[in-house]
Image (cartoon, rainbow, N blue to C red):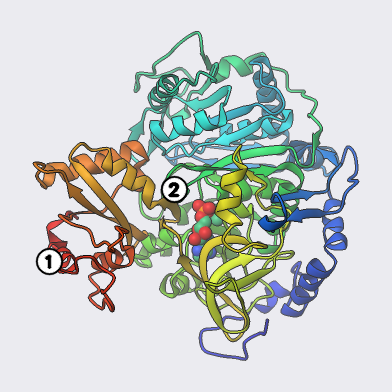
Amino acid sequence: MVVPDSEDNVFYPPIDLQQDAHVPNFNSYLELYKKSIESPEAFWKDVADEFFWKKPATGPILQYNFDVTKGNIFVKCLEGAKTNICYNVLDRHVKDGNLGDKVAYYWEGNSPDHHSEITYNQLLSQVCRCANVLKKMGVQKGDRVSIYLPMVPELVYSMLACARIGAVHSVVFAGFSSESLCERIVDAQSSVLITADGVYRGEKLINLKQIVDEALEKCKERGCSSVTKCLVVKHQALRTKSGAACNKLQTPWDPSCDVFWDDAMRDSSDQCEPEWMDSEDPLFILYTSGSTGKPKGVLHTVAGYLLYTYLTFKYVFDYRHGDVFWCTADIGWITGHSYITYGPLANGATSVLFEGIPTYPHVGRLWEIIQKYKVTKFYTAPTAIRLLMKYGREPLQKYDLSSLQILGSVGEPINPDAWLWYHSVVGQGQCPVVDTFWQTETGGHVLTPLPAATPLKPGSATFPFFGVEPTILNEHGEELEGEAEGYLVFRRPWPGIMRALYKNQERFENTYFKKFPGFYVTGDGCRRDKDGYYWITGRIDDMLNVSGHLLSTSEVEGALTEHPGVAEAAVVGRPHQVKGECLHCFVSLKGSTEFNHSLVQELKTLVREKIGPIATPDFIQNAPALPKTRSGKILRRILRQIARNDRDLGDLSTLADPKVVEQLFNQRNEGSA
Ligand code: WT7
């Protein structure tokens, strides 16, 4: 790693931020990095010492095998230790840290009329009550609880309540369809489901309970009746001021299974002894798209995840007491798990919990909230930045954003244009932009700048976090030194890396460890420049990144081919100004089916219903034939070029019938936008 000598487009950390920062300059980053790699034991011991351990570890900080040729893949952190993550992120602050009256969350609803403050004391008491409710429903250590909630405080209460009693939470993003929810319940065999009656997204009212009931119905059709209780939060936006229900929704109700959150919580005690967990006991499952279609249940465990989310939050956002942190992600994604729930709470931080969307009731909504709560550290996705860029500076100029100190980006490569706008317009040139690269699987940031230490290059996630050892490999698995481009892999684990795919060791090993024995394979391409900076070049598997969310092309293809008129479908990504990437679908129709507007609408609806609105195709193109090799393999490279209208095709000799390509180019605009 070399610091660039003053070049164009390199942004050095502001001097006043450097003065009392945790990692104040590049040399101190290098020193700490060296320690984390050469003496991981000593490095992580200092971190572990900040937490409460019911029983100390008997094993080393990390034990692992990353080499499939030598046996099963495994990672263990602090073997033998006993602790509870809920105790560490709540009780510890209240008891020893005197943070009981500190605000843990400023909750801001979809409508500016709805907001509340939750202190650490209140949070602890709500979590204990909820934990007792779950126990009463029969939930025991190791049982799975599915959570399908919008961004309301009860979502955090539920997760921490599970963690407190040793249940494994599986949060499902409340924008997913009943089909997706069902699939995730069946895989986890959850015994309890926590949801809400409904939620407003912008002006749209969504009947969540109805989606839940459809999902449970589908579960039963597939022989899964694991869910015995459904705990239902009545959303504030669906009550009158006095708290009574108002009749905006028909909430389907089955008294043998459904329990109203308030009724259950009313008589529940706010004292609950935490379950002391082994360091490697499971904490949660979070499903992420997989390239074979079926989502993968990424499993994280207690101790390593605690250490890693704590430390990345502290260093990457240079956390100090007094900060107001705001991560705009939904908790249904890993970003929310690590940087709304666990990382900030482990640090005793104050966060904003925002339920709404950036454009409702007006396009200055995010800036208004930054002003309202004097947000100091702000963390969002490039897709949101690109969306808001379109409205220019004016919506920002109405608000005072001078509280901001650090800006973060996550979810997809950030294009330099968006980076520069974020830096100069949102941050007024005063705030470093930390472009954090990571994955559901990594648990926390793995490539990232440290705001006071790392000279920034717009578009680069810069350097590895402590304990992380990246390498770039070529097709043959050879390590590339210096300036290079290839597969991004990691040579060793860090405490927060996933431990398994839930009940599927084989898929775990095949997906991440088989291609290059000895390495964890991210699935991303990466370039290292002459100064040692890492630049993510995008996915190199069959995954697409739409608005920062990974989608599996084969999952969308599977949904399309469920239509009786579709014989074959192939889906590729194509650049999109706001979403980064969007879906371009090629469909080959069966004999008599006609390609027309209503078919296109049917297909779009089908995908929405099967997967969720985020997967809605932007383009659907009629493809009487697809470009295939003589052995019948679809050449996606060519489809990507057709989607982009890039005619620089190169060698087509492997194609069975090259005429197909010209045909598809000509019909490109007959599709649907
Ligand atoms: C994939 C992981 C990690 C939280 C959100 C997504 C892409 C993520 C960056 C970044 C370039 C990025 C990668 C990665 N990605 N952050 N800063 N620069 N690409 O979690 O759904 O597990 O997706 O998102 O392709 O593999 P996820």
Query: Which residue does the numbered mark 2 point to in the structure image?
Result: 292
Q: In the image, what residue occupies the spot 74% across and 37% down?
A: 281
Q: In the image, what residue occupies the spot 24% across and 48% down?
A: 568
Q: At which x and y percent is residue 385?
A: 43, 62
Q: Residues within 10 Å of mark 1 (few under 14, many from 20)?
A: few
Q: Does any portion of residue 660 appear in the rendered image?
A: yes
Taking the view exactly as shown, the residue that stands out farthest to the top is 256
- Kindly state the secondary structure of the residue where label 2 is placed: loop
Q: Does any portion of residue 401 appear in the rendered image?
A: no
- Which quadrant holds residue 635? bottom left
Give the position of the N terminus as an image quadrant: bottom right
Q: In the image, what residue occupies the spot 67% across and 85% down?
A: 2
* Marks 1, 2: nearer the viewer: 2
**For this view, does 538 lie left or right of residue 585?**
right
Q: At which x and y percent is residue 411?
A: 50, 58
Query: Which residue does the numbered mark 1 point to in the structure image?
Result: 666
Q: At which x and y percent is residue 529?
A: 56, 82
Give the position of the C terminus as an image quadrant: bottom left
Tell me which amino acid carries mark 2: Thr
Q: Earlier in the sequence, mark 1 or mark 2?
A: 2
- Which quadrant holds residue 89? top right
